[in-house]
Image (cartoon, rainbow, N blue to C red):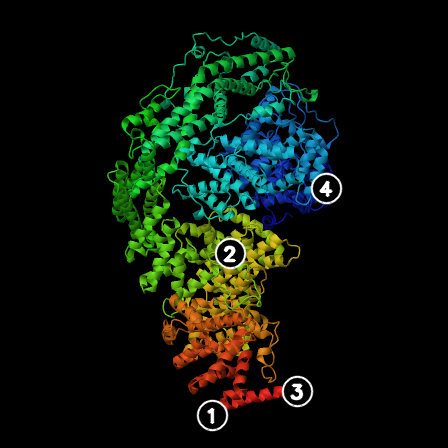
Amino acid sequence: MMMDPSEHLLNTTVNDPLAIGSSSSTTTSTTVTSMGEIADVDVYFKRLYSKTNNPPPISVDEFLDIMARCKDSQIQREKEVFQNGVRNLFEEYKFYTQYPERELHLTAQLFGGLIERGLFQQHALVAAFRAILEGLKKSPGSNLWNFAVTALDRCKARVRDQSTFVQGLRSLPTYSDIPANIREYLEYGSKPNHPPQFDSLRTLTPTSTLPLPITASPQPQVSHSPMTPANMFPRMNSGPPINNQQQYAPGNNIGGGLGRENPAQKGPSLTQNANIRTLTSDPGYSLVRVKPPPEQINDKVAFTFNNLSFANISDKAEELKEVLGNDDQLWKWVGQYLVMKRVSIEPNFHALYAGFLNTINVNVLYDTVLSETHRNIKILLTNDKQLSNIPDRALLKNLGHWLGIITIGKNKPILATDLEIKSIVIEAYHMGSQDLLYIIPFVAKILESCSRSKIFQQPNPWLMGIMSILAEMHSTHDFKLNLKFEIEVLCRQLQLQLNDIPIHNILSNKEYFDKIEKQLSTTNRQTGGYQSQQSLNATTTTSSLLYNDPAILNYHSLPSSQQSTATSSILSIPIQPPPTLSATSPVSAGSSLPPVPKYKLSDFKPSIFQSLSSMLEINPNILLFQHHPRLKTYIHSPIEQAINESLQTVQRSLKVATSAAETIVKKDFLLNPDEQQLRTSARNMVAYLSSGLVLITARPALQDQIQLYIKTHLLTVLGVPQVSATNGTSTTGNTNANDAPTATITNGTSTDQLSSQIRDMIQQAATEIAASNIELCCCLLQRITIHRAIQLIDQRLASDIEVRQRSRLEGRQLPSAANITEFQSDRLLEPIRLRYGPLSSHQLAIYEDFVHFIPGFKPSDNEKRDLVSMDETGPSVWDRLITEIDQTIQTQHNQTFVNPLQRLLESVNVLRTNLHNQVSTNAPQAALTNVLNIIIYNLLEHYTLQSQNQDGDNLERFKNVHMSVLKLLVEIRLHMSLINKQLTKAWLDCSNDLKFNVHAVNQLIRNRLLDVRQMDGHVAQLIDSGNNPALHFAVNFLRNCVIEQPCCVDTDIAAILDSLHRISLIGKQPAEAVRDLLEIIRLNYISLSTNNNNNTNGNETNATNDTNPSSPQGKVDKLAIISLSVISNGHKYLVSTDEMETAAIANKAKHILGDWVKLTMTQTNRLSQQQAFQNVFNQMNMQGLFRSDDTIAKFLRMTIQLCVNSVYDIIRQAPPLTSSSSSSSSSSSTQQAHYTRCHQGIDSLCRFLSLLTTHTSDNNNYGARIHLINRILGILAAHCYADHEEQGDQFHPLAYQRIILNLFQESTAAVSSTLLNSTSTMEENSANEHVMYYIYLAFTNCLHLLRPQRVPGFAFAWLEIVAHRTFMSRLLLSAGRFTRQTHHMYALLLVDALRLVTPFIRSGEHAQSFQVYFKGILKTFMLLLHDFPEFLCEHYYQFCDALPLIAHQLRNIVLSAFPKHMRCPDPFLVNFKVDMLNDISIVPVIAYNFSQNIQPPKFKQNLDSYLRTRAPVTFLSELRSYLQQGADPGSHYNIRMLNALVLYVATQALSTLNNKTNGQPLMSSITHSAHMDIFQNLAVDLDTEGRYIFLNAMANHLRYPNTHTHYFSYTLLYLFAEANSEALQEQIVRVLLERLVANRPHPWGLLITFLELVRNPNLKLWSREFMSISPDVKRFVLSLISASSSSLSNSENSN
């Protein structure tokens, strides 16, 4: 039986097939092999659909041969094979709607082939016809329709004889939708003449079918005999070879004319495919087409491409080189074949073909491929771009993708002479949306290859120039969404941010559009056949190219008896020589007198060649046009080409004119502040000079060029061979008899005479047209030159005009005025000195005369106005802006926006009036300030989040109008810095209720209209002064503008971050929220270049090594910032705005996920699941789930929601556990079964999501994968939080916990295996390290969003994830560049875990749930102590900072960690000195910037000053008051600040000691220092609570042997010895005993310090009164002494 359709779909893909053209030998051998022994029919179906060599594929015709043999076989088993195959085809009919395109096409070919060969019995034949009829009743384009049409096309020769069936076809309502070639074929069945035997594409597998040779009879005969293998496969049977030289048959004119191949002679042809029909039907195709090689070479080339793969690419390249050798013509043919029949329609194999091209490494092949690609692209660009012409759009995209791969992908540029991409995008924008639908996807496909290039990456100016245009298109409000999506996808592939791409407003610049060379219009299209014609003439005969004109082709349709008559009639036409110009004609008169101008400058349109078509003069009486009227349409192109060629010769004239005009104008207008006079005068002068120079230098040669180009172009169009100037012979080479055309002229002399006559007619026409239009063309050349000269002079004077505008706005004179006046007074006489101010009227008259008398044009008084506004057609920019504001006011439905817009309109009118009239020097500046103030006030007052939610469309128009005003100010060359400065000043002056609008501030910063640094300092100052609105604004600004929608980075708002950090230390609201935001920013805004070098070891790093991770010298990691934004915005996708779309996506998600769960339950092999997912991915793509980020996000939300709902349903169905022992076991097993069901569904979803992320990118472009993982986790976190809030006590964390854990394992497993692979390259390992880093960062952000404090119901599941062996080991065992960062991530999560513990321990509430949670915390830290002690050693400070003071046991676990390589000596030994230990001089690594907790900055400055100079003297007395600022809850002191102060003073003391003692610090020298003064002052001045906190802060550093342990141990003992009261001594003993009383482990430094305190007789511990108060204390101390004694005796015994 045939495979099940679902299995069929899961095991097939929809890749485009290879083209046709396999060799006959291959087909024969395969058929023979398959016919040797008949296997089950399933085997042949699998081989038919196979796309690999396992099993080896077979073609449809080979399958049909096997079926025919089985039907006629006498063996019962073989008969059953035939019957089963037929039965399967009919039984599968109901599943054809689900078949992929390739498999459906093959099945239809097989179905039609059975009918064609007569293999169906009568009843089966009726059923087959009925199946075709039923399929044709379906809607065109559906699967069944395509199946029926393909099958009918295959068997139409057999169907034509079935009149009843044909009548049934004609009665169908969809009969007119059947392809025309099939209908025409069937309709010929009732006529005496049958159509020629040619077929459309028959199979997608390689075949070798050729029809019978066509005879030389006028009417081709078609055999009505049954189709048999003998006449169906002529190349498989013995017989004479088919001769390529066929007689021409008039009725068989399918190829399009003489000299072209008849498709019927080559079997199934790809040229009949709709995709390349546009290319093959182009008139220039026959001119450049290379003669095909012999059949055996053709077959060998086709066989090579059909069997090409990455595995055999080198072998196939060598085979092809052996076949083709060094024959350039053969390589050119292969190049054309590759582009036309492979690349154009097989985009999935572009990488394979590019690799093949690179492996062959033949220059002529690459050059041909590149030129053919450009030629085909130009054909499509100039073709009619209809919306319904989808094949051409797809073809253009394919060629663009191919062009990018072979050029940009290989670091080779696309030359502007071949394709100017930036200009073509601009031209498409101005041509309209119809052209954009072609151009934008085409350009995007080209630029895709930039991601694989080393050169064409950001900031490559060529790439960024194109991206700037695309970004500007994307920002237009009426741009189509599908094109916006194309641009967004391209930016994502290139890892560019649309908001970061600078926009230069080129699209709105009409001048720029006018000056670019047009590539989409057919008027600029070069015929392109002239150069190719020179090489083509060497290989083709004269008559094969002679007459491509239809008027001459009709001659060949005549009978042979009439051809000679027609020839003689043409030869008898009198050819008149070109008329001789009389002396009185205008042209000849030009030798003595200049010709009188016929045209005015204003007669020509600003666009370059629009005037040419309407003003061209062509005499209709020219003999050539009487015989060939259509050739008139070919005159425009060569004249345009001649003018373009002449433009290259006038460049020097243009440069001379511009330089002269610039020098003279700058001198005359040196003290003239009116930039309008300067610009107008410069334009007038440069127009006069450039026009005169062109008239003198270019006119003589222009007429000869026009005549030459017309002649050459017409000869090429008519196919008349060129004549050599030396010997007068034709340039066509000798051709052999086999290459002769199918239709020849019997009289060779007549052919030569006919060619000579036509050349004479063309010469006459070219001469007369050039003479009559030379003045028009010369004026047009002058007009173009004037246009370019004005643009060039405007560029050169831009800075001068800008200085004048700025001076007027600022109300001051020109900067150089004073110096020039002083210079003139000393050197020039009064009459010739320049005076400040506008020129007088008689002075300006000199420049005005220039434009009245431009050489070559009629004088006109209107030329001044034309030149000033020649590039500003239509209303001025001010008029357009005012009209836009007025229209916005009139269409505004929300009256809230009307009054602000009215104020804006009035202020713009005032500014315009003041700028033009120059009422006073201060008026323009005041008007500008007023406009900018109104803009900032309007946006701050009305552009709010509430307005966005209520009336988003009107608000967007409201914002766009204000942005248009700002754009205009930039266009009039007002500096952006000036606008930014004024808007920032206005923002600072606003009231607090207006200025703290986060929504508006985000837009202003995003558009670079607000100075972030000034805003940063202002807000930080307000926060420090206690301004609550500023504090809330800063918090919201961080959340919205730094995390969710990043518009700036952390270094831009350093002052705000410092102020917020001080707020986070006070322990009051909103300190907790601020702390969370700062931690997220520190984690994600990490400078990679700074931190990548921080993978240091303990011997090289001191305690203060970890400075601010976001230091400005590093490059900001944009991908991490974007990922943070994505994961923080997950809540936005929980609310549905479009219910219909959401319901449709939910339905798709339900079906896709359901099918996937079933598949994973039946196929447990992960490799088979991965292969099957390709079909699921294609199905999602076909259903449009990847068309936008919103769509895929909604789909992900639906899949997660379906899984969670399923888990809730299963858990609710599970029976509750009972207390009776008899039923508890059964109830437990039932519950276990329910949980197993839950796990199966969750695991299937996780596998689905993991495969989805891996299919979105590769190692070279992992950004899309990271983006999707963050999207999944963001939606999951938001859904979990919302579910927790909604369900309350009924919340169940199973689904979320297992999804996060499984997805983490799936996402990291593949990358980890690659990192461990020894064969991986360094680049691959680097890319994989980046992927792992971003995956870890994504899961850390997700878990931080779901931290126990925020989602208490998820606390146990959360802790289980964090403590899981996979999660812990992956983050803590990661090696490479990002080790320090991953450790930071895990430390942050542990701090999140400890923050839930703190309030419970502080309050003394020990509920059962808390005890269980705390046990889990203890076990986690014990595991870290055992397996990852170095991690605890580096991050102990953060954990101790987060723990309450009374959490002694957990604190001991953290402080007991020591590096694995270290061996701590027994602390109970008496005979060792701490000073003598080698490890005691090690400086420990502390992975936390504790110094930032010392706030405010003034206190930090005083502290540093006191440590250096013991000044100020009041520092010690003020120390206590500083430590009490921002006290923690339940305390009078800021504990975090006191902890940081103690460690900071100690590190500074050790640094000072190292400098004094050359790295050999002596603890005895620390006693009399500023550092010890601070500690002694704290010990004496603080109250009991403060002193207890202070001593605990010191005890936190009594750890393994290192400098900190040594210093603090010595300091505590020194404070004990120097204490002036027993209260301090008692507290020191209490702090140490509290930690020793707790269960083990105990830190080594703690034991050393306490034992020294007990043993040292100088400290006199036992004589203190407090030691005799509690017997328990005394007993505990004695036990320690006994332990010390036993340890000593054991050591002596061992010795």
Can you tell which of label 4 and label 2 is closer to the viewer?
Answer: 2
Residue that mark 4 sits on: 34
Q: Label 3, label 4: how many angstroms apart (C-alpha)?
A: 91 Å
Left or right of 850 on screen, residue 100: right
- Tags 4 and 2 in contact by the CB under 8 Å rule? no
Crowding around mark 4 (Cα neighbors within 10 Å: few <14, some 14 to 19, many 20+) is: some
Quadrant including the C terminus? bottom right
Which of the two discs, 1 and 3, labels the residue nearer the N terminus? Answer: 1
**In front: 1536, or 1283?**
1536
In percent of width and height, residue 1387 lies at 50, 67
Judge whether 176 appears above or below 1381 on screen: above
Q: Label 4, label 1: how many angstroms apart (C-alpha)?
A: 104 Å
- Tags 1 and 3 in contact by the CB under 8 Å rule? no
Considering the numbered disc 1 on the image, is that residue within a helix, a strand or a loop?
helix
Left or right of 1399 on screen, residue 710: right
Residue that mark 1 sits on: 1668
Which of the two discs, 3 and 4, labels the residue nearer the N terminus? Answer: 4
Q: Amino acid at mark 1?
A: Ser
Residue that mark 2 sits on: 1269
- Tags 3 and 4 in contact by the CB under 8 Å rule? no
Crowding around mark 3 (Cα neighbors within 10 Å: few <14, some 14 to 19, many 20+) is: few
Circle on res. 1692: 3
